[in-house]
Structures are given as structure tokens and as C-alpha cells.
Image (cartoon, coloured by chain):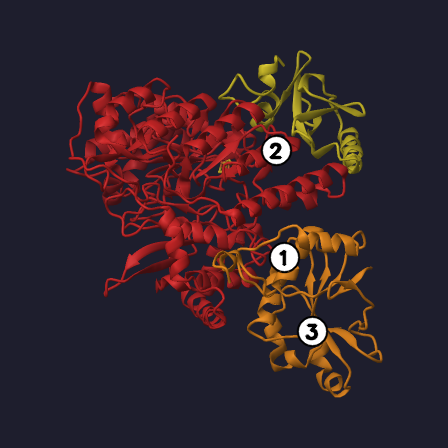
Chain colours: A red, B yellow, C orange
Amino acid sequence: MAEPNMYRYDEFDAQFVAERTAQFRTQVERRLKGELNEDQFKPLRLMNGLYLQLHAYMLRVAVPYGTLSSAQMRKLAHIARVYDKGYGHFTTRQNIQYNWPALVDVPDILEELASVEMHAIQTSGNCIRNVTADHFAGAALDEIEDPRPLAEVIRQWSSLHPEFVFLPRKFKIAVSGAPNDRAALAYHDMAIEIVKNDQGRVGYKVLVGGGMGRTPYIAQVLGDFVEKEDILAFLEAAMRIYNQQGRRDNMYKARIKILTNALGIEEMRRLTGIEFAEIKKAGTLQLPKEELDRITAYFAAPAFETLEDAMPSGDAAFEAWKKTNVHKHRQPGYAIATISLKPIGGVPGDASADQMDAVAAIMDRYSLGEIRVSHEQNLVLPHVRQKDLPAIHAALAGFDLATPNAGLITDIIACPGLDYCDLANARSIPIAQDIAKTFADLDRQHDIGELKIKISGCINACGHHHAGHIGILGVDKKGVEFYQLLLGGSGAEDASIGQIMGPGFTEHEIAGAVERVVNLYLAKREKGERFLDTYRRMGMEPFKNVAYGEELYAVHQG
Amino acid sequence: MANPSSQVLTANRLNDGTVLYRKADGWVLTLAEADVYDDKPAAQAALDAATAGLTRNEYVSPYLFEVRRENGVIHPVKEREIIRAAGPSVRADLGKQAQGV
Amino acid sequence: MPFIKDKALAADSFTAVADDAALADGPVLVSLARFQKDRETLLARNTAIGVRLKSDESPELLGEDVNRLSLVALEFPKFRDGRAFSWARMLRTRLGFTGEIRAVGDFLYDQLAYQHRTGFDAWELPENLTLDDFNRALAEMTNVYQPSADGKKTIRELRAGL
Ligand code: SF4
């Protein structure tokens, strides 16, 4: 089994996770005995990723900054088989969710996870959540520095941070080390972009106050250039302001985006600055270079072979896959390969235990034992030899994992929606399936090009609908599912919030509406324009005029 | 026929999360077996009894939802409860629907 | 209710005085409003003063007076309201407060360790908890990743052999 270069627990990390697991076991026991009532237990179980959903409990397991070893992948498969119903769901925040665990089994599941250096700590609740990062980290051509060492530093600092486990609301942090934003930084409570200043020194640009949900905001700059050793002090300062001043009277106004906009970014900067100076003076939160170096060493680039760039060719299926699912690696002769978890008509992000085991074998054989979970609910083999691509493609195809659609219109992000989620207003998955079937033709998908569709089953926006080039939001109209269409969102470096088109569509109308919108784009696009570019040039009106179709148009006007 | 106030009481079992429906003073696993309360006071009384019984730590989150009866079969009014009673609509092999209910 | 000070059961030497009640003799615990109203009288009495802050009252509102107090009681109106963790931290760091910081109100066994870490050193424990519970709660996690007001060595420092 290949051992990838990634963070490994030392005795302290191992003890920490073991004790946390034991602690949760006693919390479960106290709940079953009635020493804790549900009201008291709920925040405690959420802090360990355990929800009560529509049909059953749901356990969310962290995949810190999206990096997994093959041993971990096999363990995830094992848990799916033994404690769940044979599958898991990869989410938009680099987590995996199990939909059917029994409460009484969860402590055992956590022990299984701890045995492969994994956990469910702070994957939910009003605390700092699993830190996410660019899924191409360490392999991308455009990277300044690998974001994962900093993400690991933040993971440790935020784990059971005594001040920040009962925040006004959840808190999501993302890190990216590249100018091309693959981590949706602008939509995070706080985000860190690794940047180089004029003198060529590397430091951190810190953003604050982005978010989706009921009131979407694009994050603003809190610190242009924070020195590496100061980053934890800076984050802690901002968090302290938020914990003290964030609203607690209304859960829809409790995120830091609301505080940031109420205070204004200038005031937020000033307050953070005062607290930051104070923390810096104390000195205890300074991040010594040796510590960052020590953690960085775990993520060292693997021992690449000296190879020439030489992309192999193959049959039509391979060529189609190569075109969309294979990306340039910074090392000659290597490539990054995306494993789509979006088979046409499948459930976006779901993987069966058998698929996970198959992926683990492919990781060992071809990807130095390593894989990434992307926020687009796909898996990424970060370091594969170009010459192995045909074999990888063939191996994936055997497990229905070779769908050639990464970044295309059928690579749809969808939250679990009303099929699983207790908070949902409408189903997301069947809508994704309908749209994928509508556009199943591969030539048509390629002709349409990059088009990101994102679907949420309610305003909580777990499916990132605001950030979709085409976004779909499920709403409830007197117990019946309805869908609003949004256009023009982006979660990349050109981040923007999608605009709602108008009255909603029924579940049977929505795929047709999307098709008419896409057809208009195909008719009107100028050379080189993606859907998003054409929309930005033309605006909502023409798309709205076609979306409702003649029949629907009459209904909505009438 | 549709009685606007017909309701069923549901909850989740504490130890494993399984969806439960109220029947008499206990719980059953399928909607088909559940008691239907045709008037508001009866429904409220059932909910009050279940809420009082939360201290036994056997189930959580009891609540009422609307149903209608057609030919003796109980149908939830809202999509949410239809899915909850059956299982994920995208996975006919999972949930109560897969257990032949 | 059990009262814990410096990790042992203790007798509470402060008398809580309602806003409209007469000041008792000896050490008193008053609200921020009462303190602001009777500041001169209280400071002139030469007995220990404690102020009880609601979760939306920043210790900064005490101004320079904070270090003339012997006790600041921080209220958890509902256990989910975690503001007091940050107020305690602010008291211990920025405001340099060395007196007693007392946890009062609605909090859980599972929060005792976080309170201890952020600078609390006295507790009006919920009725169902004992000193044994308290000690057990503080011992659940051996090591910590981040510095706080308890001065405990962090895992980073332990790794570096500090
Ligand atoms: S967006 Fe809404 S429906 Fe979808 S997973 Fe999140 S909370 Fe559930």
C-alpha cells in the first residue's frame, strides 16, 4: 500500500482524537440514560457531526482539506458496509456523510475513524468547521504554495478551541494557494488566499464575511497581507470580535457576514486590528517558522519520476474523458485526473462501498496512495503518470466512475434535499437527474462547454445555488415542491451572486426551462464565451423571455 | 375523503433514529398502521402525551402532520411526509419502502 | 447550589444584592446597572465588590474600575450563548483582571473545561453537578492545541519539548 505525503498524527494528535471519541461515547451514554435531554445533547452531537435527518441519524465525517489516503478510503468503505447501507455521500465541503447510522453505533464508528487518523470533530454545530482547501493543492500549475499545511495549522488551532465552540453560528474557513480560486473563497465566513507581496514575500490575504444562505454576500478583504507567523493571532482576533458581537437573537442574522455588513468592513478591520495587536503582544499565538516548516514537510511533493510530457491517446471514450477530466500537472509527464461522481441519472456525490474500495486500489496503483475530495463532489487523483491514464480510465469505467463530464453541464452539484434532509423544502437529486438526462448527449455537453449547475433544496444553500452559473433553489408552496431559477452566479475568482429569474417552476418544468436557457446561450454566444460570459453580456431579460416558454409564460402572466 | 384536520403523530426512535408513528399509547414503524386523529383536540392530546413522555428517552422530536385517507389508505398531504414514510425517492431500495411497507 | 472556587468546594463570601434592595454588609455582588448607579458608595465602602455582567455586557463597560473589583460574574443566559467565553478571555488578557471570574446561569457539564480554559476560576454549579463531576470534566482532554487564559502548555510547545 502506498503511503502518500500528507499530515500524519503524532502521539499528541492520536491521544487528542482518542480522548475526544471517549468523551463523545460518554455523552451518548448520558443521553441514553436521560442525564442529558435532547435540547442539551443536540449541540454536543452536532459538534461531532451527528444530525437527526428525515429518515434517520446522519454522520458527517471530516476529510480535512480534502486529502485522503487509500487506507482511509478503505476505512470509509468499511464503515459504509458495516454501519450504514453500503454507501456514502461526498459533500460540497470536503466531508463524507453517512445517512443511516444508529446513535448507539456512532462511538464505534468514531473509533474506527480514529484508527486511520480521521474524525467527525466540528463537522457541524456553531463552531469552526472542517477547513477546506483547493483540491488541486500540491499539484496545480498555478500554485504559489500548497495551502494544506496552513489548513492543518488552522485545523489544530480550531479543534475544541475553548472560546469558539459556542459561536453565534457555524463558521467556515477555506484556504487557497493559487490565483485561480478552486475553493470558493468568496463564499466563506473567512478565507485565506496565499499571496506574494511586492518584495516577493509570501503571506496571507484574509477575507471575511462571505456566505450563501438567505442573504448571500461576497467576502471582503479584512487583511491585505498578514505575515505567516501572525495568521493565527489575526484569525483569533476576528473570531473574538464575532463571538462577542455577532447576533444571537435571530439565527438568520447570526453569521459573520451580517456582522461585517452591519459594522462595515472598515470598522471590522479596526476592531480586528485592536484585538490583533493585543494578541500579538502576548506572543503565545505566534506561529513559529519551525512549526509551519515541520507541518509543511509532511506535504512534501512526492518523489516524481523524470518523465516527458506525452499524453496517450485512446478510443473515443478515453479521449472524451481525457478532454474534461484530466488536468495539467505542474510536473512534466504527470496529470491530475478527476473521478466524476456524477454518472448520468445517478445521485451526485454518492459512492458505494465497492466504488470506494475500487478507488482505493486505483490510488495505490496509480496515484501514490492519495486522493482528494473536491467541493464539486468529485474525487481527484492528484499525481498520476500520463502514461497510466488509459489504464486508470479502464479501471474506473469498470465501476461506473469514468463519466467524462468534469466541469460540464451534467457535473451538477446537488445537496441531499428532501430525499434525506430534515430542513429541505424540495428535492434536489431528482432535478439533477432530470437535467443530466436532458443533456446526456456528450457532443452536446462538449458544445455547451463549462457550465456549472448547482441545486439546493432550501435557502440554506448547501448546494451552492447562488454560485451556480445556473442555480436552482427548491421552495415549498403549500407542501408542493417548486424551483426558482438563478442565473449568473460564480464561486470562482470572478465570484458573483446569481440573480433570481422570477416565478418558480414545478419539478416537471424546471429541466425544460434550463434547456431553453441553454439553447438561447448556444444561439447567442460570441466566440469563446462561456454561458456565464454570455449571461453577463446580455443580462437576465432575454433568458427570462425564453425560460418560461410560450405556455408557461401565459400561465405566469395570467 | 379529505378531512382538513386529519393528522398523524410521528417521532424518531432515540437509539437508532428510525421513524415512528403513534398507535394508541405506543409506536409503530409504518404509516399504514398509525392512528389517524380526525379532530384537533384528539391530535393535540396525543402530541401532549408524547411530549410528556419524552423524559423516558425512548424517542425524540414528536410532531403532527396532515394526512388524508383514500379507500382506507393513509396518505400524507405534504411531499416531505410522503418521502419520510417511504424512504428516499431516488433510492427505492432504501428506507421503509424497501422493507415492503 | 454547589459553589466551586479554585477547584474546591467553597463558601460564597459574596451576597447577591438585587437592583432595588439595600446593600448588604460585607462583599456584595451587584448588576452592572447597580454598580454604575451606586459606584461612589460602593467604592467608598472598602469591602470587596463583585459585578455580574449579562452576556451582552462587555467588561469594557466597567472601564478603569475593573481592577478595583474582586469578582466579575459572567452570565450564561442559555448554555448555547458562548459570549462569556470571550468576555472571560478579554478580562484575563486585554484588561489584566486577576480577581475571581465566576460562571453563573445556564451551562452544562460539557462546558466546564472550556470555561476553565478561558479564565473562569469559580462556578455556581448547576444543582445536578458535584465536585467529582467538575474534576472529571476538566480531565477529559489531557492536552490542548491552542493557548488560552489557563496558561496550559499547548501541543505545539510539548512537541517542541518546551
Ligand atoms: S440546502 Fe437545505 S435541503 Fe439542501 S442539504 Fe442544505 S439544509 Fe438540506
Q: CA distance from mark 3 to mark 2?
A: 48 Å
Residue A217, horizontal then vertical, whole percent? 41, 52
- Host chain of mark 1: C
Image point (80%, 51%), residue name: C128
- Name the one closer to the observer, C130 or C47: C130
Dot 3: what SS?
helix
Name the disc covering residue A428, or none: none
Image point (41%, 22%), residue name: A346
Name the quadrant containing residue A313: top left
Disc 2, disc 1: CB below 8 Å? no
| Residues behind callouts 2 and 1 on a single chain | no
Asked if residue C8 is positioned above or below residue C32 in the image, the reply reads: above
- Name the one closer to the observer, B80 or C13: C13
- The residue identified by callout 2 is A108
Image point (61%, 41%), residue name: A21
Dot 1: what SS?
helix
Number of the front mark, 2 or 1: 2
Q: CA distance from mark 3 to mark 1?
A: 24 Å
Q: Is residue A144 left or right of residue A118?
A: left
Q: Residue type at mark 3? A: Leu
| Residues behind callouts 3 and 2 on a single chain | no
Dot 2: what SS?
helix
Residue B38, horizontal then vertical, whole percent? 74, 24
- Name the one closer to the observer, A238 or A145: A145
Q: Residue type at mark 1? A: Tyr
Asked if residue A111 is positioned above or below residue C133 in the image, the reply reads: above
Number of the front mark, 3 or 2: 2
- The residue identified by callout 1 is C114
Residue most extreme to the front: C161
- The residue identified by callout 3 is C32
| Residues behind callouts 3 and 1 on a single chain | yes
Q: CA distance from mark 2 to mark 1?
A: 25 Å
